[in-house]
Image: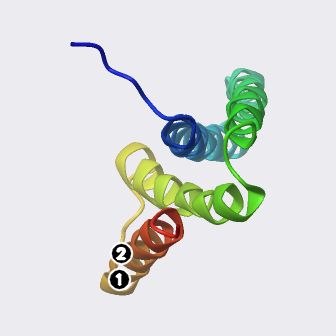
Amino acid sequence: MTLSLSLPLVGIALVVLSSAIEGFAQVCLKRSAMQAAGKLRWLALGIVLFIFEAIFYSGALQSLDISTAYPLGALSFVSVILFSHWLLNESIDRNRWIGLGLIICGAALVVGQP
């Protein structure tokens, strides 16, 4: 049995991956702003991650309409909040959880359009 992925599915996966990379890159930039020691290391890592994010997103645009890919990019808001919670110990209050849920629902609606 072979696994065959459609081009739009690959594009969606690439947008999700680029959103996750962007979230981690944002945390790296925050770390570079918070620490004097190792500031350049965190800054460089953030910049390199943004470059990879752009490469993956460009790959997604080869198989997705921009009207689908760009709204899916809102998932980066979700990844930023989750990574900042896990790695920077930032709190997520009830309203943010609700907002994250709405963003995810909106992304699902965009993907579900024919």
Judging depth in this view, the residue of 50 and 39 nearest the camera is 50
In the drawing, what numbered circle is on residue 20? none
The furthest residue to the left: 1
Judging depth in this view, the residue of 102 and 96 nearest the camera is 102
The residue pinned by badge 1 equals 98
| Rendering quarter of residue 27 | top right
Is 30 placed above or below 51 here? below
Is 12 placed above or below 45 here? below
- Per the image, label 1 sits on a secondary structure element best described as helix
The residue pinned by badge 2 equals 101
Please say which color scheme the image uses: rainbow
Mark 2 Cα within 10 Å, few/some/many (few <14, many 20+)? few
* Mark 2–mark 1 distance (CA, rounded to whole Å): 5 Å
The location of residue 30, given as percent across then percent down, is 65, 47
Is 26 placed above or below 100 here? above
With 59 as the anchor, is 27 left or right in this view? left
The location of residue 38, given as percent across then percent down, is 68, 23
Judging depth in this view, the residue of 113 and 47 nearest the camera is 113
Q: Residue at x 38, y 86 (%)?
A: 95
State if disc 1 and disc 2 touch (CB < 8 Å).
yes
The location of residue 41, given as percent across then percent down, is 71, 20
The location of residue 88, given as percent across then percent down, is 45, 48
- Per the image, label 2 sits on a secondary structure element best described as helix
Q: Residue at x 41, y 43 (%)?
A: 87
Image quadrant where one finds the N terminus: top left
With 101 as the anchor, is 66 left or right in this view? right
The disc labelled 1 sits on which kind of residue?
A: Ile
The disc labelled 2 sits on which kind of residue?
A: Gly
Q: Residue at x 76, y 57 (%)?
A: 66
